[in-house]
Image (cartoon, rainbow, N blue to C red):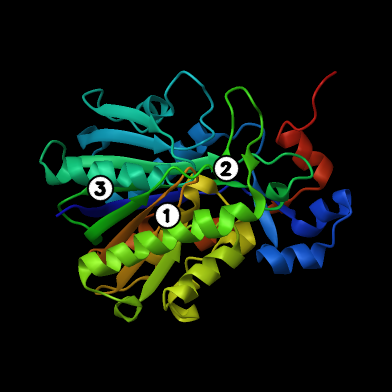
Amino acid sequence: MAGIVGYGVYIPSYRIKVEEIAKVWGDNAQAVSRGLVVNEKSVPAPDEDTATISVEAARNSIKRANIDPKKIGAVYVGSESHPYAVKPTATIVAEAVDASPDLTAADLEFACKAGTAGIQICMGLVDSGNIEYGLAIGADTAQGAPGDALEYTASAGGAAYLIGSENTLADFEGTYSFTTDTPDFYRREGKPYPRHGGRFTGEPAYFKHVLSAAEGMFKKMGTEASDYDHAVFHQPNGKFYIRAARKLGFNEEQYKTGLLTPTIGNTYSGATPLGLAAILDVAKPGDRIFAVSYGSGAGSDAFSIEVKEGIKEKQGLAPTVQEIIKNKRYVDYAVYAKFKGKLKMA
């Protein structure tokens, strides 16, 4: 059975508060914060992108796994903000972590669920015996047009998972996916910012897919919300996350640990993987975790995970999510706009 051998995360240290963005656009900061359940978000520095975030997260996952990176047989990087249109991020990561060239590597794109798609691929390769270890990463430096609602949430960060079958810290009990052609969010080739369907992104998009995948997972496993100690969902904002959790029967004690959007924003492909990592940082052997991602376009991947004894010795081998979150420096809107390349030369 495939499981998690190691995990690692990285979040840029720069932050911008919701009120700083609201001040520029004349919005009510308190209303925005309450409506989205977001207080501040991470901002990538000029020298940070999906590749650098992925490399740092991957290195931390290898520290936790305590394995020889030469044994990694597959590297998949899921993102919607790869630095190159034609040039894989995955090969950069593989080289940076000193993996052997005897591997398969690819970039994945499925909006915010590309990272969990990579986990599923690695699970299959490990279970089939084709590889010993697979590295799956979800990372993004998310885009939001100036003045758009996305600007309050679109942030940066990522998480990496080493998947294997021996010395695991958590095992996958099962996975289930739900997918339809729902164009709630998209970005055309060559365009700098995505477009979205406003409220359309909620009911027929996010909630339909997250709830359907979750209910499919429950049915497949013969479980319900009360069978799990922790739950984490994709979090475009805190409001959607909490509503989905409650609709499925989870209480605050179960879902609060994985809810990171209020302090770092929506990291897109990194959102569910980062939330899962925050749970693994504090999980105990025997705990069961329920995780559901979401990617616009649209689809969701659900996972049922059981924590193993091996987690106790691995939790402290790399920085935790909360340790990284606490390392922060605030910027104003002018610096934020400069870092994000929102200022264009005439």
- The residue that label 3 is drawn on is 163
Q: Position of residue 297 (x, y in %)?
A: 48, 42
Residue kind at label 3, given as amino acid type: Ile
Please identify, in this view, whether the residue under mark 3 or under mark 2 is nearer the observer: 2
Determine the secondary structure under disc 3: strand
Residue kind at label 2, given as amino acid type: Phe
Residue nearer the viewer, 124 or 249: 249
Residue nearer the viewer, 155 or 72: 155
Residue for point 20% across, 36% down: 71
Q: CA distance from mark 1 to mark 2?
A: 15 Å
- The residue that label 2 is drawn on is 185
Residue for point 36% across, 33% down: 97
For the N terminus, which image quadrant? bottom left
Q: Position of residue 300 (x, y in %)?
A: 40, 52
Residue for point 44% across, 42% down: 181
- The residue that label 1 is drawn on is 293
Residue nearer the viewer, 190 or 262: 190
